[in-house]
Amino acid sequence: MVEVKDLTKYYGEYAAIEGVSFKVEEGEILGFLGPNAAGKTTTMRIIAGFMPPTSGTATVAGTDVVRDSVEARRKLGYLPEQVPLYDDMSVREYLAFCAKVRGVPGAKQSERVDAVMNATRVTEYADSLILKLSKGFRQRVGIAQAMVHDPPLLILDEPTVGLDPRQIVEVRELIKGLRGNHTVILSTHILPEVQVVCDRVVIINEGRIAAIDTPEALTAKLRRSQQIRLDVRGPRTQVADALRKLPGVRGVTDEDAGDGVFRFTVEADPDKDIRETAATMVVKQGWGLREMSSVAMSLEDVYIHLTTNDGAGSPSARQEPRPPTEPERRDDNEGMEETR
Ligand SMILES: Nc1ncnc2c1ncn2[C@@H]1O[C@H](COP(=O)(O)OP(=O)(O)O)[C@@H](O)[C@H]1O
Ligand SMILES: [Mg+2]
């Protein structure tokens, strides 16, 4: 349904995305997951035909979004980050206006408006001014406008951002209900969101794809290790070596925390809780245990973890602007096959 090949976008000298490639199968819900500034909105705007890439291509059901953007846009509905609602229109008026602008034939307009109001459950507010709607209902109207011309593909940019927990659940349910009838690409910076809603996930980090997989496979990847952090006053190499010898420990990194204290990050098998053995060992050796904590795998860590493991770009690599004429090319297709 969607094929994105080697997309690169420069804003001036700055590469917002580089060599982004992935495919979306018909009827699936694809999560586009990444921290702020990863390049999600940039990629979605390009696929939605709202902005050309610097290089690379994107097609929607075989139509190139740059060469034939009018035709491509007929096949897709787009919910931007900032929903472009007109506050002084009623929900019905606004959706009818959108239907008209998107070329829905006059005779079909009211039928389409009713259908999308029904699908997004805003019918009871059909005659309310958009101004009066809660954030959750505004978001539903935003999704309704994306669907009004009945496109097979929906591109939803952070559809649950700014909603309260109950509204989040409702909007997620709404999106899940679209599976099968629609192909959906939704962006998010929230890991649980993709676990709940998506069939497959593309993780983007610093403008590059870090992983493409099912949510289950990604979670399994994360569960394959645990990390703890110890601040120890003692001889740096000896402490690190002793930690490495503990059963279940896979790796230890150390850094200078100042004042003769070193910070050790210990990676271990997930099935052994190594906190007690590590603490006992340090104390027995007569070293000073200043602090110990489990390192929770936050989403941010997940990105770093995946990015490092897959060797796909480092933060420093992105700091240097590259000349727009010679963007660095990476063969991300290779990585895609691997992760399938
Ligand atoms: N119009 C723009 N001009 C310059 N830089 C931009 C512009 N839009 C986005 N960027 C930069 O490109 C990077 C990616 O942004 P964006 O695609 O919005 O990321 P995300 O949606 O994942 O938060 C960010 O560093 C952002 O500051
Ligand atoms: Mg964004």
Image (spheres, rainbow, N blue to C red):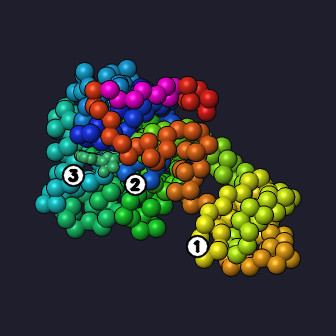
* Camera sees residue 8: yes
Depth order, front residue of 133/106: 133
Q: In the rendered image of this protein, does residue 40 appear above or below residue 132?
A: above
Among the two numbered marks 1 and 3 on one chain, the one whose residue lies closer to the N terminus: 3
- 288 relative position to 2: left or right: right
Helix, strand or loop for disc 3: loop
Q: Does residue 216 appear to the left or right of 304 in the view shown? A: right
Q: Earlier in the sequence, mark 2 or mark 3?
A: 2
Categorize mark 1 by other alpha carbons within 10 Å: few (<14), some (14-19), many (20+): few
Name which residue lies at 71% across and 65% down: 236
Q: Name which of mark 2 and mark 1 comes first in the sequence.
A: 2
Residue at mark 2: 36
Question: At which x and y percent is residue 314?
Answer: 49, 44
Choose mark 2 or mark 1, whichever is in front: 1
Q: Report the residue at 79% width, 59% height from top.
A: 241
Cβ of mark 1 under 8 Å from ligand 1: the answer is no
For numbered disc 2, what is the local secondary structure?
loop
In this rendering, position of residue 82 left or right of residue 200: left
Residue named by callout 3: 84
Q: Amino acid at mark 1?
A: Gly
Q: Is residue 125 magenta?
A: no
124 on left or right of 213: left
Inspect the image, locate mark 3, and give the three-letter code of the amino acid beneath it: Pro
**Magenta-highlighted stretch: main secondary structure?**
loop
Q: Secondary structure at mark 1?
A: strand
The answer as to whether callout 2 falls within 8 Å of ligand 1 is yes
Q: How many marks can you see?
A: 3
Magenta region: 326-333
* Label placed on residue 258: 1
Q: Nearer the viewer, mark 2 or mark 3?
A: 2
Q: Position of residue 214 (x, y in %)?
A: 60, 41
